[in-house]
Image (cartoon, helix red, strand yellow):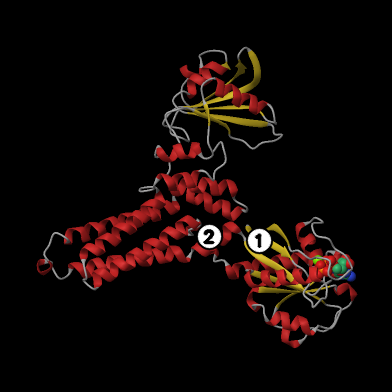
Amino acid sequence: MMTDDTIAAIATANGASGIAIIRVSGPQALTVADQLFHCKGPRPSERPTHTVVWGRVVDQGRLVDEALLLIMRAPHSYTGEDVVEFQCHGGAITPQWMLRAALLAGARAAEPGEFTYRAFLNGRMDLVQAESVNDLIHSRSERAARLALEQLEGHLSRQFTGLYQHLVSVAADVEATLDFPDDELPPAVMPKIAAEMDSIILQISELLSKWQDGHRLREGLTVVIAGRPNVGKSSLLNALLGKERAIVSHEPGTTRDFIEELFVVDGIPLRLIDTAGLRETACSVEQEGVRRTRDQLKKADLYIYLLDASQPIHADDLANLAQLPKKRCLLVLNKTDLGKSSTPSALTDWKTVETSILYNIGIENITSILTELIKSVINYESIPTAVISERHYHILNKARHALKDGLVAVQGKTDQVIAAHHIRQALEQIGAITGNSATDDILSAIFSKFCVGK
Ligand SMILES: Nc1nc2c(ncn2[C@@H]2O[C@H](COP(=O)(O)OP(=O)(O)OP(=O)(O)O)[C@@H](O)[C@H]2O)c(=O)[nH]1
Ligand SMILES: [Mg+2]
């Protein structure tokens, strides 16, 4: 990516919309605006920063659109460079014309993430904050968005920066010991360094322990809907989603391949999975469906197990339930409109909801118990400081390894040079998180995931 040229992109989503925004950033941004934008009074480049002006965009004598122009001069802009934004009419055509006009006036089409990359290079945000921009855009639930926003505000960056600075001071201490012959080193020095390293390892471990929560919050919890054929699993999926997503039929064995849909409860994204009914069958396609259901059952976070309440419980149900973790499972006794058989005593201490999904009865009770279950697998309190990115997780793990090796060297007094080497490694790792020591490869891997215009 180059940064001394001027880039342009449509910053809003494609499709019919009232307004679209064309963003231009770089040293020539105001020149591009001067060429395209015709307004009363001074030209864009003669106007102060943070002003808005109405005018017409004209490309080679042809009117492209009426638009508002926003002027944000360096360094007070998203990228830290001169930025102009055209607010024009949305839709499939006008924004494309506007972009083409900006390109003809001297800008270059931006690559994905290039605006945020420039913001990073110009010190407007660190790498952790830049990543959160992408997380925010792709958030699938309110809580995930709030977490990304906290990260953008620097919450997580501050923790990493603190860690980095702590590590820098330990590294300096260790390097200083290298200048001493072993027998002249004051005896308190190495134990103090070891204690510092220990506390950093602890901090990293704490961050890592919260990763699971952050990760679940972003990717969503997997909730498998299971049970014997024909009990109403697909009906439940449809009722929760409020749409006819899965085929429902009175024939047992209707669902074969599993069906996955996103469903948000209490701000947490859930990946609801409707599965093939569990039974022995001669049909090879259904057998494959049942095998896939069992696969899903092994890796789910939460379970909804349906029973036909009007029928006496089947031995298979008891066998299936014995495989599921009681604390993470909701038992749904469906078809109560057809009558109620008594619940076996073995199931009385399971979380249970009675429903008649066909008549839309009891669905809210399912969502409220799901909320309780979610709380049992995600620690809501720890979320604001959760490490959510997989990249951070892997780097922190490596840094912890390096530090542990370093600690062994310090404690065993094997060799301070080796200890210093491990600490430097850890320092480099943590630096790669915030961008203090990120390589070009890391940077392009991060920013290429962005959409164009961000
Ligand atoms: N009476 C009654 N019928 C229901 C209820 N819920 C679902 N059904 C009916 O039961 C039949 C089976 O429903 P599905 O949702 O297809 O059941 P399933 O568990 O997905 O079945 P498979 O995909 O075959 O495993 C359909 O005819 C539904 O209309 C209910 O609460 N009461
Ligand atoms: Mg089904």
Earlier sequence position, callout 2 versus callout 1? 2
Q: Nearer the viewer, residue 422 or 335?
A: 422
- Residue beneath disc 2: 214
Q: Residue 178: x and y, percent?
A: 17, 60
| Mark 2 secondary-structure assignment | helix
Does any portion of residue 373 appear in the rendered image?
yes
Labelled disc at residue 437:
none
Q: Quadrant of the N terminus?
A: top left
Does any portion of residue 357 appear in the rendered image?
no
Q: Residue 61: x and y, percent?
A: 62, 12
Q: Residues within 10 Å of mark 1 (few under 14, many from 20)?
A: many
Q: Residue at coordinates 85% horizontally, 63% vertically from top-left? A: 248
Work out whether 145 lies above or below 312: above
Labelled disc at residue 270:
1
Position of 167 with respect to 377 (left or right) is left
| Picture quadrant where residue 365 is located | bottom right
| Mark 1 secondary-structure assignment | strand
Disc 2 residue type (three-letter)? Gly
Q: CA distance from mark 2 to mark 1?
A: 14 Å
Query: Quadrant location of ligand 2?
Result: bottom right
Position of 257 with respect to 402 (left or right) is right
Verify CB contact (< 8 Å) between mark 2 and mark 1. Answer: no
Work out whether 41 lies above or below 13: above
Q: Residue at coordinates 67% horizontally, 78% vertically from top-left? A: 324
Q: Quadrant of the C terminus?
A: top right
Q: Residues within 10 Å of mark 2 (few under 14, many from 20)?
A: many
Q: Residue 43: x and y, percent?
A: 51, 15
Q: Residue at coordinates 36% horizontally, 48% vertically from top-left? A: 436
